Amino acid sequence: MDVPVIAGRASVLRAYNAEADSCVARVRPYRLHTTIERLDKVAHTITRLGKTMGIRVAPDYHRLRVQEITLTADYRAKQDEEKERIREERERQRDERAALAEFEREKARLAKEQSHYQAALAKLHAKGDTAAAAELQTRLAEIGEAIAGVEAREANTRALIFSDDAVSLETRLHAALADHRVNKVNARREFFYPSPAQVRDLLQQIAGQHLLAYHDTAEALEWRASGTHARPTQQPSTASA
C-alpha cells in the first residue's frame, strides 16, 4: 500500500475520532438525535471523499462510536434525574421544616392560651362560680382538641420524612467521621480532615447506588482554558460535609 494512502487513512481516522470524541464530550439527552446525525454526516463525507483511495469508516466501528454517544447521553440523563430528585427532596424538606415550625408556633400559642384559662378556671373554682367555670371548661376542651389536631398534623408531616433523605445521610457521615473532626469541642462546627477519596468510600457504603459520579480533579473548564495554572499557597486542607 502506498505511503500517501496510509498517511491519508491515519489522518482521516484522527479526524473522525476527534469528531466522535467531541460528540461524546458535548452530547446531552435532548441533543442525542442531532449529535448522532452529526457524526453520521462526518462518516458519510469521509466515505464520499475517500472513495478513490478506498478510505472509509468501518460500519462496525462507527456503530460502536454511536453506541458510546448513546450510553453517554443515557448516563447524563440519569445524572440530571438524580439532580432533579435531590432538588425536589430539598424543596420537600424545606417545606416540611416550615410546616413543622408553624406547628410549633401554633402549639405554643395554644399552650399559652390553655395555661391562661387553667389559671382563670382555678380562680373561678375557688370563688365557687360554677357557671363561669363550666364555660371555661368548655373552652379548655376546645383548646385541647385544637392541640391534638395540630399534633396529629405534625405527626403526619414527619411521617413523610424518608430514612435515606439528605439530612439522614449527612448525620451518618458526620457520625462516621467523628474521629476526624477539626473542632473537638464544638460539634456544630462541621469540618473534617479526611480526604475526598475517604469521603467517597463512605458514601459508597452509606449511599450505595445513589453515588453516580466522583472526580478526583475538578473539571474547571474555564480555568483550564484561560491558561492560568499558577498554584496558590498551600494550606492544610479540610473537608466539610
Image (cartoon, rainbow, N blue to C red):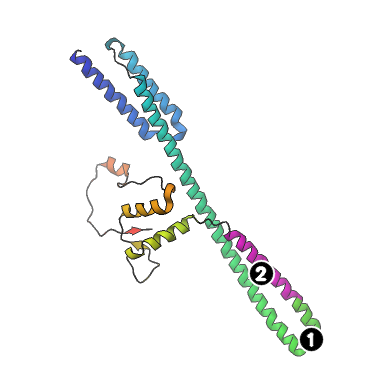
Neighbour tally class for label 1: few under 14, some 14-19, many 20 plus, Cα within 10 Å = few
User: Residue drawn 64% across and 64% down?
Assistant: 152
The secondary structure that most of the magenta stretch takes on is helix
Residue 96 vs residue 145: left or right?
Answer: left
Quadrant of the image for the N terminus?
top left
Residue 227 vs residue 133: left or right?
Answer: left
In primary-sequence order, the first of circles 1 and 2 is: 1
The residue segment tinted magenta is: 138-160
Residue 73 horizontal/vertical position (percent): 42, 34
Residue 42 horizontal/vertical position (percent): 36, 21
The answer to whether one can see residue 60 in this image is yes
Residue 111 vs residue 97: left or right?
Answer: right
Decide: marks 1, 2 in contact (CB < 8 A)? no
Residue 211 horizontal/vertical position (percent): 41, 48
User: Residue drawn 44% across and 30% down?
Assistant: 32
The label shown at residue 225 is: none
**Residue 175 sits above or below residue 198 on the image:** below
User: Residue drawn 24% across and 21% down?
Assistant: 10
Outermost residue, right direction? Answer: 131
**Residue 229 sits above or below residue 34 on the image:** below
Residue 138 vs residue 112: left or right?
Answer: right
Observer-side mark, 1 or 2, equals 2
Q: Nearer the viewer, residue 233 or 174?
A: 174
Q: Quadrant of residue 11?
A: top left
- Which residue position holds label 2? 147
Q: Is residue 154 a member of the stretch shown in magenta?
A: yes
**Residue 19 sits above or below residue 241 on the image:** above
Residue 97 horizontal/vertical position (percent): 54, 61
* Amino acid under disc 1: Asp
- Which residue position holds label 1? 129
* Amino acid under disc 2: Ile
Q: Nearer the viewer, residue 226 or 215?
A: 215
